[in-house]
């Protein structure tokens, strides 16, 4: 099938295209130089054209996500819809699998990553991917509290740890090394937590700093496309910005493996809004976002996403089990908790971010400060840590906030608790994002840090034909004033193409193809690999409740498998 998207205002930062009127040609699922005269025409006159959106951090599939769906029927009732070209779906903060794919596509997103997969429950995650239409996807296995990882790093055996990581990534069909509250979730299994990066895990006697450094070295040895994906210790605690800055420094002197090609960073820090708090208690809690932003501005080894508060009732879920217990103790709402043997743990708690409440108001301000005070949009990605800070369906609202100081000030002066002004600098920051900068933080930056920018996040020849067309005319719409037009325009795309197929037209889903599953296929030294595998198999017999042979995810679970190669030096 051939298409030509004509006369649109194209925003493609990876190719230095900033609002030029251009035609985009599509053939056989790819963007090409030209098409034949028989190509179907999509008239994008007076409309914005961007690459399909890329979400590098969301929670859309897997065991804890399903717990969030099951134990919150009130959330399912809040948003339900029968889609004309697909299945029915429900769920506001935790949509069902089908609805997740549809909602992303309606916003012009074509790729989304599940940011925390317990390795033991990888099959569950891939089964839900199978039922999530349209979007390409991948999952990040959890490494930061894994017994094997802690043992190998405690012994200083980075090569053995790399061989284990290679096996685990292949076994789970995972994409990146995810680290959540390193050593802290293991401590939670003993009824505690760690505080700061030099507080060791019980029994294993290894600190978060050692885990972060060791896994960063492992990541570069394996030439993984994405850097380590770090959820810092002390999430959500007043005063945690000091732990955050210390964590950022740990891998600073590790060099990105040049064989990875696309990235020069070694650290991706996630939902940093939750890690930018000053003070000692909630009474003297203040924003320290300016210090975090200053660090990011001055250092090139790091990229962050924000985890922007959307001021909604939502469902929090994370492998940071002790934090979820703290949240449950704070709000008294229902709480689910699970320990995953030898690997990780997680918790799920509903939460209400009320604009009238003092702490959520400051949290909102902190996220906005990070976006607006980090100078380079190539260092920050738009996320809400969905659904933790709010559902991904609020991305259009966040975009409108970023593009309009008036929108922000109306909220600050009319709805937000006064703490937002008293305990942050947000009311003094008048920067407004451009359309090109929005394309960066939602497309090009995400694709680059994921190692997918050869085919994702841009509209150059050879890219996947993942394209979003929005009913926004940049010649007549002033985002600073017409912010509701921005929010509405990015909520329901005029057209979305996925691999060259029209999947959304006039905001409605019209097709629901399967997306591909990215995973990393790594190779390591055979002698080290064999020795590590023998140790792993022995420990399985001793500790695991499943057989070693039943652990790996079979190829049949990935109907559109997209392996990415990596090789250990």
Image: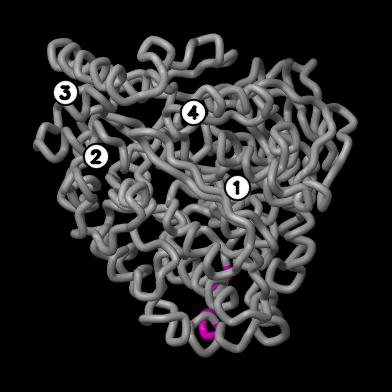
Q: How far apart are the two marked residues, 3 and 2, measured between alpha carbons?
A: 15 Å
Q: Secondary structure at mark 1?
A: strand
Using residue 467 as the reference point, say whether residue 538 is left or right of it: left
Q: 465 left or right of 213? A: right
Element type where label 4 sits in the image: helix
Q: Nearer the viewer, residue 20 or 28?
A: 28
Residue depicted at x 75% and y 45%: 91
Q: Counting other residues with Cα less than 10 Å from the Cα at mark 1, is it few (<14), some (14-19), or many (20 or more)? A: many
How crowded is the residue under tag 3: few (<14 C-alpha within 10 Å), some, or many (20+)?
A: few
Seen from the viewer's position, the closer of residues 71 and 215 is 71
The circle drawn on residue 215 is: 2
Residue holding disc 3: 569
**Residue 243 image position (x, y, % from top left):** 28, 65
- Specify the quadrant of the image occupied by residue 403: bottom right
The residue shown at (28%, 70%) is 242
Name the residue that disc number 1 marks.
11
Q: Compute the Cα span from label 2 to label 1.
A: 36 Å
Query: Is residue 83 on the magenta stretch?
Result: no
Residue 114's disc is: none
- Residue linked to disc 4: 121
How packed is label 4: few (under 14 Cα within 10 Å), some, or many (20 or more)? Answer: some
Give the position of the N terminus as an image quadrant: top right
The residues colored magenta run 427-432
Query: Relative to 427, is 171 above or below?
Result: above
Question: Is tag 3's residue or tag 4's residue first in the polypeptide sequence?
Answer: 4
Mark 2 and mark 4 lie on one chain; the one further toward the N terminus is 4
Which residue is drawn at the image coordinates 43% and 43% (left, top)?
A: 345
Label 2 Cα crowd, 10 Å radius (few <14 / some 14-19 / many 20+): many
Label 3 secondary element: loop
The kind of secondary structure the magenta stretch mainly shows is loop
Residue at image coords 64%, 50%: 392
For marks 3 and 2, the one nearer the N-term is 2
């Amino acid at each position: 099938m051939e298409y030509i998207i004509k006369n649109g205002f194209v925003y493609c930062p990876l190719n230095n295209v900033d609002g030029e009127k251009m035609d985009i040609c599509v053939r056989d699922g790819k963007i090409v130089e030209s098409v034949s005269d028989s190509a179907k025409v999509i008239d994008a006159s007076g409309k914005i054209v961007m690459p399909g959106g890329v979400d590098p951090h969301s929670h859309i599939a897997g065991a804890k996500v399903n717990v969030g769906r099951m134990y919150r029927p009130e959330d399912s009732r809040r948003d339900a819809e029968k889609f004309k070209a697909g299945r029915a779906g429900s769920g506001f903060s935790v949509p069902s699998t089908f609805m997740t794919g549809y909602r992303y596509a309606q916003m012009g997103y074509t790729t989304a990553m599940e940011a925390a997969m317990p390795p033991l429950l990888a099959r569950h995650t891939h089964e839900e991917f199978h039922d999530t239409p349209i979007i390409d996807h991948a999952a990040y296995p959890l490494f930061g509290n894994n017994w094997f990882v802690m043992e190998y790093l405690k012994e200083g055996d980075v090569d053995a740890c790399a061989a284990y990581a290679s096996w685990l990534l292949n076994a789970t069909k995972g994409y990146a090394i995810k680290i959540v509250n390193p050593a802290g979730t293991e401590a939670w299994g003993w009824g505690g937590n760690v505080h700061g990066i030099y507080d060791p895990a019980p029994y294993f006697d290894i600190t978060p700093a050692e885990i972060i450094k060791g896994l960063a070295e492992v990541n570069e040895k394996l030439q993984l496309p994405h850097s380590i994906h770090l959820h810092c210790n002390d999430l959500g605690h007043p005063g945690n910005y000091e732990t955050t800055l210390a964590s950022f420094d740990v891998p600073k002197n590790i060099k990105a493996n040049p064989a990875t090609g696309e990235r020069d960073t070694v650290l991706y820090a996630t939902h940093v809004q939750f890690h930018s708090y000053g003070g000692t208690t909630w009474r003297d809690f203040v924003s320290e976002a300016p210090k975090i932003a200053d660090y990011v501005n001055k250092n090139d080894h790091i990229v962050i996403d924000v985890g922007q508060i959307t001021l909604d009732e939502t469902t929090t879920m994370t492998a940071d089990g002790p934090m979820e217990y703290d949240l449950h103790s704070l709000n008294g709402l229902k709480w689910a908790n699970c320990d995953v043997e030898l690997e990780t743990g997680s918790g799920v708690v509903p939460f209400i971010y009320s604009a009238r409440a003092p702490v959520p108001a400051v949290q909102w301000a902190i996220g906005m400060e990070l976006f607006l005070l980090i100078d380079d949009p190539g260092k920050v990605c738009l996320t809400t840590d969905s659904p933790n800070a709010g559902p991904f369906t609020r991305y259009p609202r966040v975009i409108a906030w970023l593009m309009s100081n008036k929108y922000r000030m109306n909220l600050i002066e009319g709805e937000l608790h006064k703490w937002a002004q008293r305990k942050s600098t947000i009311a003094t920051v008048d920067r407004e994002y451009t359309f090109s900068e929005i394309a960066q933080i939602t497309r090009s930056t995400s694709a680059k840090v994921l190692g997918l920018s050869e085919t994702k996040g841009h509209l150059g020849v050879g890219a996947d034909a993942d394209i979003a067309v929005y009913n926004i005319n940049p010649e007549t719409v002033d985002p600073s004033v017409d912010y509701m037009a921005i929010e509405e325009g990015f909520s329901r795309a005029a057209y979305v193409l996925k691999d060259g197929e029209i999947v959304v037209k006039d905001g409605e889903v019209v097709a629901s193809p399967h997306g591909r599953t990215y995973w990393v296929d790594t190779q390591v030294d055979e002698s080290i690999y064999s020795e590590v595998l023998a140790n792993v198999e022995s420990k399985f017999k001793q500790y695991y409740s499943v057989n070693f042979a039943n652990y790996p995810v079979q190829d049949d679970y990935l109907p559109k498998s997209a392996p990415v190669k990596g090789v250990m030096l």
